[in-house]
Image (cartoon, rainbow, N blue to C red):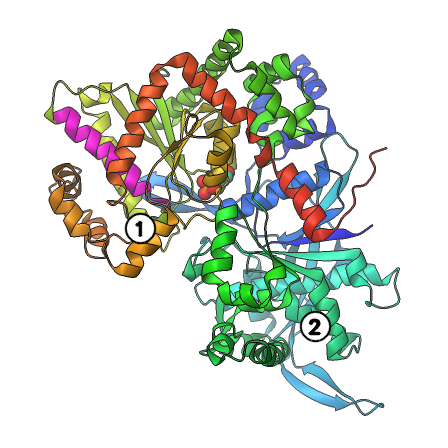
Amino acid sequence: MKQVIYFSMEFLIGRLLVNNMQNLGIYQVAKEGLADFNINIHDLEEKENDAGLGNGGLGRLAACFMDSIASCGYPGHGYTIRYEYGFFRQKIENGKQIEVPDQWLTLGNVWEIRKPKHAVEVSFYGHIEWRQGENGRSYCHLVNAEHIRCVPYDMPVIGYENKITNTLRLWSAEPSSENLPRNKDFHSYLSETRELCHGLYPDDSTEKGKMLRLKQQYLLVSASLQSVLKSYLKENRNFDNLSSRYVFHLNDTHPILAIPELMRILIDEFYYEWDKAWEITTSVFAYTNHTVMAEALEKWPVSYIRTLLPRIYLIIEEINRRFEILVRNSTGQEEKVRSMAIIKDSMVHMTNLAIATCFSVNGVAALHTEILKNEIFSDFYQLMPEKFNNKTNGITHRRWLVFANPELRKLLADCIGEDYICNPNQLTKILENVNNKKMLRGFLDVKKQRKKILADYIYEHNHIKLDVDSIFDIQVKRLHSYKRQLLNIFHVIYLYQRLRADANFKIHPRTFIFGAKAAPSYFFAKKVIELILSVGETINNDPYVSQFIKVVFIENYDVSKAEIIMPAADISEQISTAGKEASGTGNMKFMLNGAITLGTLDGANVEIYNLVGDDNMILFGLKNQEINELRKNHSYNVWNVYNQDNEIKQVIDSLKDGTFGDSNKFNEIYNEIMYKNDEYFVLADFRDYCKAQQKAEEWYKEREQWAKKCLINIGNSGFFSSDRTIGDYAKEIWHLKQISDK
Ligand SMILES: *Cc1c(COP(=O)(O)O)cnc(C)c1O
């Protein structure tokens, strides 16, 4: 059957023991069997390392997709790198983030099987020689290249109770056994080879022009394509019909080198003519864009690619030459030829290469796809509108509800049965029960149990005692300017100042919970973590204010932590600057567990809002269009906001007056806001955000009404199951059939 090959530099898998036993249908029997030996299965679960081969949302999406592809019965396999060290572990020391290596393999990875028989060789460097063939055609040879042996490690991806198991293949670099380099000693070769799969790049939005990163990317796509094509050739004489058997999906820009690599293999190794090779290549690749942030639209210096991958560079040059002709002939406009060029300013623009080649280009939420079509890739969209489509992200509701929140699972089972586990649309059945008092009280009880579990965790790790009747207001995600953790902590400072200033000002007790890793080189993001910790320190130790507010920073936010956090939230903070968050998937995990979204009209928040409406979500802030207008007309001035609103001024001034420690400590945050005209519109949205927060408090006080809103959110969350997303990819892009179950 036709299969999808999902190329991704990241898979943020998390733990697999519970997931695999649940999907096999043996969890309950294992739990009872272990109990007979006085072993609590939960203690066993805690022993497993969290596989963190990804940075955040993008890597977690790939992992959710693998679960849904197998659980929905589609044939499809993931390909990635077997990083020896995953995403760094975060420690907080002296009020700052410290990065510690993630040694996830020290106890071995029990799920993987090394497959040395399936090793392939990948070539770097060298130079090109053209040799005349007997037919008069010239053929390209790469000489004096350096060869690396790539050994696959396979991990099973087990479908939910359907007897289907796909594969996640992880490549590891080893020294070649036959082709040792002649121009360097074995020792340097060995250490360079080891370096290749040493670690994941701990940054999800910027590419530091690093040769090593480029090597990793090429290693992944070259090894994977060789291995896939080899197995294809066992049953086919040539690659003419490759697209009837395979579709290659590129998860973001990182694996785009697969395009020229397939061209290279077809032309140099199987002697295809350019045109036929191009026809095959353009029929097998599909690309997903994940961000509109300019710094994440990957570009590589021509000199890097030319040095490391001389043949690949020539192929990109030829694709570019032909594409320029196509654009010139169809538009007649030189500025369009330039804007869409793959090579310009001595850089290779990877996204342009992908859009020029792939038969499908998709965004990850409705608004995001509109921005791709009408803003950042509008020239491409006008030229080739048929390529563009939307596939709103999703999450596997099995991991994020059924397994992570057994208390909620039980409540739902008693009310609507368990058909929703394989058919998430069935969650809408809850909507018929949202006025049932027993159900409402049942939900409040489940939420309280889950808040208690999180409170116990926080007491153990942060030594902060929480009131489970306070509002658990949670923002957990990577730390980034556009995600605006700063807006959240500014609101906390504002409440602190009002409580201090006015003895009559009272609020319902709140627990503000944060979790976020900052990229090690992202100075500003690290400062925001310092600010959150300092504000927490001041407030939690203030005998008066701490009766109303607690601020908690959960160290080392990862998948396992998310599984404890999501079920415990009352409020889900999704407060990015409109237009910047492509989709978000954290927002979906919270919704599925019955939290109320407090957010901007951004990413998939728009679709949450369209499903649940103003009664069940709290919307605030500027819209994408409004922000575009403000930018275009230069009509936003941060100093006006600061000077005209005394409470905002006090919040900003507290960064410099020593309220939260040393008065110089937060200069960079002050400067970032005040001297860069508040690039992410934090102060522009501040007042509306405060109002939204007040509304959340009023809603929360009406306990049964609140429970009803939460249940309406759960009842509408089936759309955000990755089963729905994968169904859409399979039908509309991949054209896959489901394997019959029995
Ligand atoms: C879901 C998830 C993310 C993505 O969160 P967003 O709020 O969508 O940015 C990041 N990290 C982890 C560990 C996750 O589970």
Which sits in the foreground, 16 or 572?
A: 572
- Measure the C-alpha gap from mark 2 to mark 1: 41 Å
Quarter placement of the C terminus: top right
- Residue at 19%, 56% (x, y): give it: 675
Classify mark 2: residues with Cα within 10 Å, few (<14), some (14-19) or many (20+): many
> For residue 325, which quarter of the picture?
bottom right
Tell me: residue 695, above or below residue 90.
above
Q: Magenta segment range?
A: 483-500
Which label sits on residue 263? 2
Q: Which element is circle 1 on?
A: loop
Q: Is residue 158 visible?
A: no
Residue on which disc 1 sits: 680
Q: Nearer the viewer, residue 704 or 532?
A: 704
Q: What residue is rendered at 26% in x and 24% in y? A: 549
For the question of whether residue 553 can be seen, the reply is yes
Residue 206: say if magenta.
Answer: no
Picture layout, residue 129 above or below residue 585: below
Amino acid beneath label 2: Met
